[in-house]
Amino acid sequence: MDPLTSSSSGTVPAVNRRRFLGSSLAAGAALITGTSLRTRAQESSTPAARSPHRYRIGICDWMILQRQKIRALQMSAEFGADGVEVDMGSLGQRETFENALANPETRKAFLDEARRLNIEICSLAMSGFYAQNFATRPTVPRMIQDCIDTMTAMNVRVAFLPLGVTNDPARHPELRSAVVERLKTFGPIAERAGVILGVETELEAAEQVKFLDEIGSPAVRSYFNFSNALQNKRDLIAELRTLGRERICQIHCTNQDGFLLKDDPAIDMPKVKETLDDMGWKGWLVIERSRKAGEGGNVRANFSANAAYLKSVFQS
């Protein structure tokens, strides 16, 4: 039985626990610290991990209309990206994600294609939590375990966890304690697996620091999204500096639709690079939105232009 095979209950199957604990003990032998977790988050079994660049450029598969489709790898390579953030699949009212990567043949096909294209699967995304409630949904532990199991099987070190419109502490402070308690539970599990849960929230940076410190796990970090600062009229550069190098695991280098990144008056991208350089940060900048007004459906034009621009700034 494959370790990712799920039972019909809302709990983690016994075989999952046994195999997960085995891999956890192996990972734990290295005494994973905050620094080693940051390093492991930038490792991968795919060839793009050997890139000489400090910053690498990724694309969200669901934003190019290829959620959990292997075609996303080929398209991202054609658009000039170094990697792809692959979604865990639809959620809706299911007990867990509709995750095609639970199938070992599908996982192998994705990894083989990534190696063939010299492109990396930089992270897995639990985008279902944009709309579904992380704080109160009873089967969330199974969902998180399924994601961690998939990460372990594919040697992917970062998962994107958006708190979304239903339970982001910035919008729903009454749910903050429930969110913190859940992440306190999942943090040690992620630590033992050697992976990082990257949480996106609209909290301003100083509040994010308090939020992460309250959770207290090096495996729970900020998945920073430029648009959260920009849409809330906050200073993007100051937000980055306040969070600092160790708290940011990955970045959605994006704003709301309306402009391509190179034309967006709200983002001084060379200044962003200078700031990240000064912070000593390195890692993945993942393109999510930032589509030109009137061309929202032109996937190739939008994502190719954004990838080319980010490479001209961050990899020149």
Image (cartoon, grey):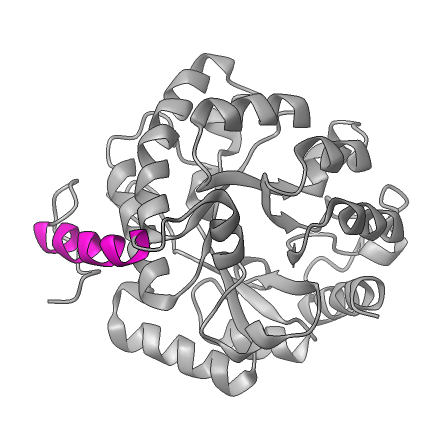
Question: Where is 106 relative to 211, above or below?
Answer: below
Query: In the shown orientation, is residue 103 left or right of residue 171?
Result: left
- The residue nearer to you, when weighing 309 against 283, is 283
Residue at the outermost top position = 174
Q: Quadrant of the C terminus?
A: bottom right
Look at the magenta stretch and give its main secondary structure: helix
What percent of the width, then of the height, locates residue 257?
74, 48
* Picture quadrant where residue 243 is located: top right
**Residue 260 in view, yes or no:** no
x and y, in percent, of residue 261 in the image = 81, 55
Residue 67 at least partly seen: yes
Instruction: Indicate yes or no whether the magenta region holds residue 229.
Output: no
* Residue 12 x/y as whole percent: 16, 45
Q: Is residue 35 left or right of residue 54?
A: left
Residue occupying the point 84% across, 68% down: 312
- Please state if 283 lies on the left or on the right of 262 as rendered: left
**Residue 149 vertical position relative to residue 117 in the rendered view, above or below:** above
Residue 2 placement: quadrant: bottom left
Q: Residue at x 26, y 53 (%)?
A: 24
Q: From what the image shows, is residue 78 above or below residue 178?
A: below
Q: Which residues are magenta?
A: 14-28
